[in-house]
Image: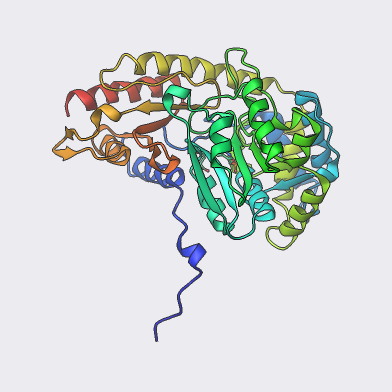
Amino acid sequence: MALKPISRIAAGVQASTTLVIDSLFKQMKAEGKDVVGFGAGEPDFPTPEHIKQAGIEAIENNLTRYTPAAGLMQLREAACYRLKTDFGLEYEPKQIVVASGAKHSVYIALMTLCNPGDEVVIAAPYWVSYSEMVQQAGAVPVIVTAEEEQDFKISAAQLEAAITDKTKVFMLNSPCNPTGMVYTREELEAIAEVCCRHNIYVIADEIYCNLVYDDIEFVSFASLNEDVKNRTIIVNGVSKSYAMTGWRIGYSASNPELAKVMSNYLSHSTSAPSTISQHAAIVALKGPQEDMQVMKKAFEARRDHLVERMNRIEGVSCIKPQGAFYVMMNMKNFLGKQMYGKTIESAEDFAQLFLEKGLVATVPCTAFAAPGFVRWSYATSLAEIDKGLDRLEEFIKNA
Ligand code: PMP
Ligand code: GLU
């Protein structure tokens, strides 16, 4: 007898493009292929020594038991300390909810806010997981596109035009994955005014807050005013700032009522992330911050080099991102053209061929709602960046 169909929502979930490319890249490498990776966005640096030690000590001191669902009190205090020190934001530990990575924080924020049929406005290009997570919550993603000519940033007027009486949430990501662009204070104020006037919640994913270059100001959305703070769930974490992607610690800061619901939700799903990782994250947030500055400087130098060289390659171009560690390569020139006997119909075709023939892994941005672009993560060494760009030149020349 044929089994009954599974959940419609689950059946509709697509695999994450970024993670698919990353496993393909790692598999090719394991097979001994000389492939260069610009796929998944994760720092190539090891977790700083003092943070690793905190994890080791947690194990040695038998700090290996369950914690409260919303995370250890010291970790929630450490998150409050960072929010206060870095952005002047006042939160109490009961407003902080720790989750298994910032991705998980976004997920429970959406689960907490959305009813089936609610609309969630997402500024595109956006990180691939947003639209999937909105759909997992039974809500409807409403995509508002920012073109390259707008520096990939939507205007408050565009946001307002997308709002209906079903709109519940606006998803903001600054600095943005995949564009690397950072919203200015004025731009955020205009967006905040629209959100307050239409009574919309905001999920502000600020995971890249520490990776902002050229002395550009990073403004935490919740810092704009009390009304904005009350309707915003800030998402942050240790993955990007402290090179801790595998430790799986993210957190949110919100009003206490929302935090309570998120904590309840966690208490029946993951029951808090690994206790060992939580102890390491306390040290990351409260300990010395110098390692982060060293990584940031390295990312900035890599960005400068990559952007400068990419723009000298015939047929492709990119604008200079201001933060995170991604570059959006415009490959529209190749759409409809023949390369290696194949018509390039999409960024996927280009990226796939580039991986096959050029042995370079990049992420096609179709799933980021930016067809015509391929994302390069420059969280890799200058030598690898040069190797990747040499191969891009060859790939285009020999096509
Ligand atoms: N938000 C954005 C915008 C991201 O790019 C990522 C990717 N790492 C995350 C959240 C998730 O981070 P984490 O690894 O902490 O789950
Ligand atoms: N966020 C990173 C990226 O966009 C890591 C992979 C993922 O979780 O999507 O590449």
Compared to residue 140, the image places residue 22 above or below, namely above
Residue 240 x/y as whole percent: 60, 33
Please state the quadrant of the image where ligand 1 appears: top right
Residue positioned 29% across, 21% down in the render: 390
Quadrant of the snapshot with the C terminus: top left
Compared to residue 129, the image places residue 297 above or below, namely above
Work out whether residue 166 can be spotted. Answer: yes
Residue 218 x/y as whole percent: 66, 22
Q: Is residue 178 left or right of residue 291?
A: left
| Depth order, front residue of 62/11 | 11
Q: Is residue 252 left or right of residue 381?
A: right
Residue positioned 77% across, 28% down in the render: 287
Quadrant in which residue 398 is drawn = top left
Quadrant of the snapshot with the N terminus: bottom left
Residue positioned 74% across, 35% down in the render: 228
Residue 134 x/y as whole percent: 56, 52
Work out whether residue 235 can be spotted. Answer: no
